[in-house]
Amino acid sequence: MTVQEKAGDKYVYDFAEGNKELKDLLGGKGANLAEMTNLGLPVPPGFTITTEACQAYLATGREPDGLAGQIETHLEALERGMGRRLGDPQDPLLVSVRSGARFSMPGMMETVLNVGLNDRSVEGLARQASSADPDSSGSADRFAWDSYRRLIQMFGKTVCEVPGEQFEHALDEAKRAKGTHDDLDLDADDLRGLVETYKKIFAGHTGREFPQEPREQLDLAIRAVFASWNAERAILYRRQERIPADLGTAVNVVAMVFGNLGPDSGTGVAFTRDPGSGAQGIYGDYLANAQGEDVVAGIRNTVPLQELERLDPKSYRELLDIMARLEGHYRDLCDIEFTIERGKLWMLQTRVGKRTAAAAFVIAGQLVDEGLIDLDEALHRVNGAQLAQLMFPRFQLDHDFAPVARGIGASPGAASGAVVFTSARAVELAAEGRSVILVRRETNPDDLNGMIAAQGILTSRGGKTSHAAVVARGMGKTCVSGADGIEVDVPAKRFTVGGHTVAEGDVVSIDGTTGKVYLGEVPVMPSEVVQYFEGSLDPAHVDNALVRAVHRIMTHADGRRRLAVRTNADTGPDAARARRFGAEGIGLCRTEHMFLGDRRELVERLILAATDAERTDALAALLPLQRQDFVGIFREMAGLPVTVRLIDPPLHEFLPPLEQLAVNVAVAQERGEDVAKEEALLAAVRRMHEENPMLGLRGVRLGLVIPGLFAMQVRAIAEAAVAVTRDGGTACPEIMVPLVGAVQELETVRAEAEKIIAEVVGDSGVEVLIGTMIEVPRAALTAGQIAEAAQFFSFGTNDLTQMGWGFSRDDVEGAFFWRYLELGIFGISPFESIDRDGVGRLIRIAAEEGRAARPGLKLGVCGEHGGDPDSVHFFHEVGLDYVSCSPFRVPIARLEAGRAAIETAGSDSR
Ligand code: ADP
Ligand code: MG
Ligand code: MG
């Protein structure tokens, strides 16, 4: 978007002119300050400079025409309303300058308080404070100088990039000189001295004196907020979170109110309900005689908000009233920031508050009970990522376990184990059956084996997109990254943290959801939500607010969704579990698992068959075994559709690795044993070796090359279906041909299959569908032709992603995905969430052209994307009939399919 300046553009809005819907223009903070103002709540007066002004500034490097004048006009109105002038030496109006974008963003400039103070107005401020309360003349001086030193500190740090520690050191020094730890013990003279020191720090770093002109302070602060939109950290954050780079930030200029005027003043933050559990009540912190930033900075110890009832009952009651009004108005949990100036309450911020996954469900349920929202809205307010979090086992922390360090929850789960520092040691200990936690400063591709062997991964560096985080998420392994309280010493095989030394073999516990690290083994508790899904917790009979809320919202989602949800399952027990989780069929039953274990020998016979007769024998021996597998699954799924994929992987995957065979042969020869069979296997493995097995002889290609292989599988499926039906059951098999790229491949397989099916099924009434996977880009692009021969399509999004991007999944995730994520080339791995623009486009084309050729063509997706929240929304949008995912993801897919349905319904009616 290019920003055009037009004469007459409105860049500044009084709080009375805005409202909460104007977040794009006024930012979240400004829009909500306006909303509270218009609700008649006590908000200090002020105005908001729009994101458009910021965009114009960033595009041209200067303030847009008209902005200075509009600020002047609004400032004058503010001065008139307050009866004071900005920085007036006798009785100064002071303001805060606060950034506030559409999305809150780390790396953005924050807040400068007390703008308007200088060497003269600080005296005026002190006189005014003491005349308002003559008993407090000593403390009035203190207050004024405290405010001034805060201005220089915040202005220096955020506007002029003076390193913040320098100010903090000077403050510590002043406290030390006074023999105290509490900044309240510093008196006016101490603070006056501190201001002198601060000014020297400021001048030393910026090469100029601290600006004394109030309007210059204001303009510099506003410009710094604008510029902070393009701070390096903010840019990086936006790339990763896919926040558009051109939104810009708004700037709020707010008349100061003072929480540091004495013991009857103070400042605090609060939530309208517990953001941890969702329980109703008052949750907050209060700090007497302080300015806002102190609460967050943790400079002094806060007291629980309930204390305010004793300290200032009138303000306390007013605050409770306001919180109730805000909840009723926003129909949600709100968080607020407030200040009390000499017994008068002021509201400084509100927004719909962040919450934990459990609280999200519980609160949504409560708000329905309270009549504030309906079930659609409740469903809209929770999501699959939250549900997924609730399905991991958790640490049972009711004992005295305190975390020793905290990093980033990079891959959820709870893991305990012996600490190891190298990949090799991880593999060794795991082989002894021990649970291990791999601890590294940062992992790299060499650590891959150790990561596979470990129960969890802990690093002291790196964020959510570090190598450790990306690979762990791909593997579904618990990971805490960037726990920078930990000092890892790999050569010494130990790490230190907060005075503890942890050596190799010592046990630690890591929580990949919260990022917390504990010494020793913390007991793990199963997830109540999983127990509910498995049927062992009945929501009607347990007193568990979370289980009841989950039950209610899931039931609603099921009623709303259009997408069916199936599961990927290869065995009867898997299928049974998935059904309890709500699966409505099997979308992917992989037959290759049925070739493993004690059946390997038959597969070897098949591969080594030198004559048609030998091959036919081997297949005939496999047939009854396969049939038995299918009977088990069809029974379990009792009439629900079961999509069976004909064998997909390259056959050499069923043979021992080349090196192992070569050694066996050599050893046996040495001993003079008969090695004919080993030699034949070795020769077969050498012959079948492929440079790129994923692109080699597999899927339909195998079926066309090895006579009788697919025919045996088709026969086993049809016979199993007939057997189940004859026993009074129902079986609905759907035979799926993998890796088809051309309609001719499918036609050939289908002609043979139909003959066998007709012969087996006879007049049993069993119906067997034949369809194909769409997982080769060419298949997607020729879907119109392929649909002529297919009764259904199932999108194999893993292969479609591999082949669409040209990525070999096993190689790329560890090799460079972390870098791509860091650079923002991906917001998320395309194996985790469907790449809508590329791979998604292939799906869209295939769905449209397939349906055009064969109206009513059944469309589904199998592969982990089927259980990824964002991807489910995409599959709903393109009109698929079902998604299929692993059993554990079935509830997540159900929930998101329900959300997708109400969101489309909502946008249609709007
Ligand atoms: P953040 O986005 O980091 O929370 P804010 O702009 O909300 O930054 O400012 C931080 C704190 O500064 C607020 O919570 C409030 O306590 C204090 N503050 C901001 N503006 C004012 C004001 N006009 N008067 C008094 N305190 C203020
Ligand atoms: Mg704030
Ligand atoms: Mg595939």
Image (tube, rainbow, N blue to C red):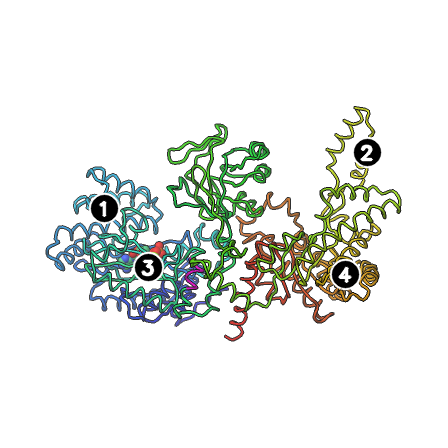
Q: CA distance from mark 2 to mark 4?
A: 42 Å
Residue 844's spot in the image, x, y percent? 65, 64
Q: Residue 195 got which mark?
A: 1
Q: Is residue 659 magenta?
A: no
| Label 3 CA crowd tier, 10 Å (few <14, some 14–19, many 20+) | few
The answer to which of marks 2 and 1 sits earlier in the sequence is 1
Q: CA distance from mark 4 to mark 3?
A: 61 Å
Q: From this viewpoint, is residue 221 visible?
A: no
Pick the residue in front: 311 or 548: 548
Mark 1 vs mark 3, foreground winner is 3
Pick the residue in front: 703 or 340: 703
Examine the image and state in which quarter residue 693 appears.
top right
Span of residues in magenta: 359-365
Q: Disc 3 residue type?
A: Gly
Q: Disc 4 residue type?
A: Val
Pick the residue in front: 677 or 286: 677
For this orientation, the residue located farthest to the front is 727
Q: Is residue 416 above or below residue 147?
A: above
Instruction: Tell me: is circle 3 under 8 Å from ligand 1.
Output: no
Query: According to the image, label 4 marks what residue?
Result: 722
Instruction: Tell me: is circle 2 under 8 Å from ligand 3.
Output: no
For this orientation, the residue located farthest to the bottom is 909
Q: Disc 2 residue type?
A: Glu
Q: CA distance from mark 4 to mark 1?
A: 90 Å
Mark 2 vs mark 3, foreground winner is 3
Q: Residue 281 got which mark?
A: 3
Mark 2 vs mark 1, foreground winner is 2
As helix, strand or loop, the secondary structure at mark 3 comes to strand
Query: According to the image, label 2 marks what residue?
Result: 679
For this orientation, the residue located farthest to the left is 135
CB of mark 4 within 8 Å of CB of mark 1? no
The answer to which of marks 2 and 4 sits earlier in the sequence is 2
